């Protein structure tokens, strides 16, 4: 009986198991890069100002590509795109491995950013469609578990390679894993390809409103087809029309993206702070991140189920609040034992609570818009984060090495309070839409049909 109960915690279906396995294979290097790419840039001769420039370039390129990625996911074969993204990331890792100096990392950066622009929307869309609504946070928790396992393996392996073999060889090994992920994803069936698949809210909910133009059409009654660029803009216009008439969606997009500023600051300077200010060696830092990942694995499963019970809004707001307090605490302690305790707590916070944010987002958006929804989400976050690396460099040089982390912590705490106070809680199809009765887009589509 105990065995059956344990197995029920992993009753997610073949498609979800393949998604999780491929997520692990595709993201070992990406997880390690969060800790070691800034140090790799320093190793290749980069300064603090060069770090700011590099991550600003990453942010600008992502801003250009992120809407394209969401549009591709909504308009084209999702399984093919799902296979393509790790292949792009693997090629980028090989380019990084061959770079003779830090400016030569930028071509690989651009290719990896293209992979990211497609990967985020497609992960979100596939998991949202596979998961039943009442278990959605649990499914996102299971998906997050793959990234938590990456958080164990990636930092340990990356730190070992960085100190003893060379980070370039780690990038080569990671490229092989990424190409393996492409094969695993070729075995996944897009739930929308199943002839028996019924979208959330019924078939009409996924078809959009009556008169909404289909992919590639020239618009209602136009009698002609659009080109790819025209289709991209028309698809964005359709999404914005939906978002504008659905109360709370635009506010949610803005509020949930405020921490993109703190996230970019952390990505740019956290590992450098730990190495140069806290005096934690790269391999030892890898052990800390691995310990956080070990705690996060069971926390992902427990946290997903908790968010399904207590509500995504409560869990999501608590995640940002505790994350900010954790960052403040990090700058106040010293010694490896103290950092060990804090990183274990980090695993509980991020592993246990952050899957609720993905489920919360999925609740607010019907299937037909999920790729574009994530594209717009990420675009807003990217635009907010553009000045973050430069601001971080100014704080580092003008105030001190801990100042960028203080700024990031304050941003997360403020975000938590704003989300809890103002963000919507209901799913999009349950929110009354302005000028439509009796309910939001899904109900409106059913009425039009």
Image (cartoon, rainbow, N blue to C red):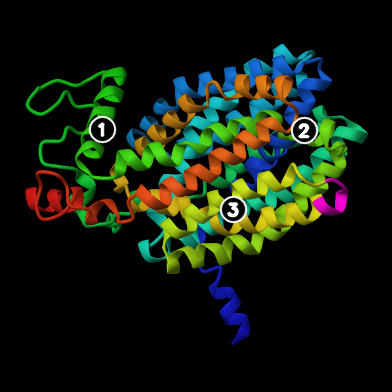
Residue designated by label 2: 273
Query: Closer to the observer: label 2 or label 1?
Result: 2
**Would you say residue 308 is visible in this rendering?**
yes
User: Tag 3: Cα neighbours inside 10 Å, few (<14), some, or many (≥20)?
Assistant: many
Of residue 225 and residue 273, the one placed in the foreground of this image is: 273
Describe residue 236's horizontal placement relative to residue 262 as left or right.
left
Residue found 74% across the figure and 15% down from its top: 102
Viewport quadrant of the N terminus: bottom right
Q: Secondary structure at mark 1?
A: helix
Say which residue appears at 73% left-offset and 33% top-offset.
402
Say if the magenta span includes residue 402. Answer: no
Q: Height in image: 267 above or below 431?
A: above
Circle 1 residue:
240
Q: Residue at x 20, y 53 (%)?
A: 203
Q: Nearer the viewer, residue 114 or 378?
A: 378
Judge by depth and name the residue closer to the eye, 87 or 375.
375
- The residue that disc 3 covers is 322
Looking at the picture, tell me which residue is in the foreground, 118 or 274: 274
Quarter location, residue 314: bottom left
Residue reaching furthest right? 164
């Amino acid at each position: 009986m105990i065995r059956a109960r344990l197995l029920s915690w992993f009753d997610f279906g073949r498609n979800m198991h393949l998604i999780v396995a491929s997520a692990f294979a595709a993201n070992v290097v990406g997880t390690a890069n969060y800790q070691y790419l800034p140090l790799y840039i320093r190793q290749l001769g980069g300064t603090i100002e060069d770090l700011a420039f590099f991550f600003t370039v990453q942010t600008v390129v992502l801003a250009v590509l992120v809407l394209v990625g969401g549009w591709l996911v909504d308009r084209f074969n999702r399984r093919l795109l799902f296979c393509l993204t790790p292949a792009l990331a693997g090629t980028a890792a090989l380019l990084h491995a061959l770079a003779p100096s830090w400016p030569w990392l930028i071509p690989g950066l651009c290719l990896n950013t293209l992979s990211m622009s497609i990967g985020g929307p497609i992960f979100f869309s596939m998991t949202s469609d596979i998961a039943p609504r009442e278990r959605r946070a649990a499914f996102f928790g299971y998906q997050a578990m793959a990234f938590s396992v990456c958080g164990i393996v990636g930092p340990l392996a990356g730190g070992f390679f960085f100190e003893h073999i060379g980070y370039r060889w780690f990038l080569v090994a990671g490229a092989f894993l990424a190409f393996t992920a492409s094969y695993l994803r070729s075995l996944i069936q897009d739930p929308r390809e199943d002839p028996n698949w019924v979208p959330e809210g019924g078939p009409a909910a996924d078809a959009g409103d009556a008169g909404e133009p289909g992919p590639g059409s020239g618009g209602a009654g136009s009698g002609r087809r659009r080109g790819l660029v025209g289709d991209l803009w028309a698809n964005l216009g359709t999404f914005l029309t939906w978002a504008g008439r659905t109360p709370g969606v635009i506010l949610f997009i803005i509020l949930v993206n405020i921490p993109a500023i703190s996230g970019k600051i952390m990505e740019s300077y956290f590992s450098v702070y730990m190495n140069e200010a806290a005096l934690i060696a790269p391999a030892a830092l890898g052990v800390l991140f691995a310990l956080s990942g070990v705690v996060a694995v069971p926390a992902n499963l427990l946290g997903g189920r908790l968010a399904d019970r207590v509500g995504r809004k409560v869990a999501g707001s608590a995640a940002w609040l505790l994350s900010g307090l954790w960052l403040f605490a990090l700058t106040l302690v010293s010694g490896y034992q103290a950092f060990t305790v804090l990183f274990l707590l980090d695993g509980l916070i991020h592993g246990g609570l952050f899957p609720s944010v993905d489920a919360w987002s999925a609740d607010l958006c019907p299937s037909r818009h999920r790729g574009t929804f994530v594209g717009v989400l990420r675009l807003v976050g990217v635009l907010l984060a553009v000045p973050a690396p430069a601001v971080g460099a100014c704080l580092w040089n003008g105030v001190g090495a801990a100042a960028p982390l203080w700024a990031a912590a304050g941003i997360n705490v403020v975000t938590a309070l704003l989300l809890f106070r103002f963000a919507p809680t209901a799913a999009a199809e349950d929110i009354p839409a302005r000028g439509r009765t009796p309910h939001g887009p899904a109900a409106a589509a059913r009425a039009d049909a």
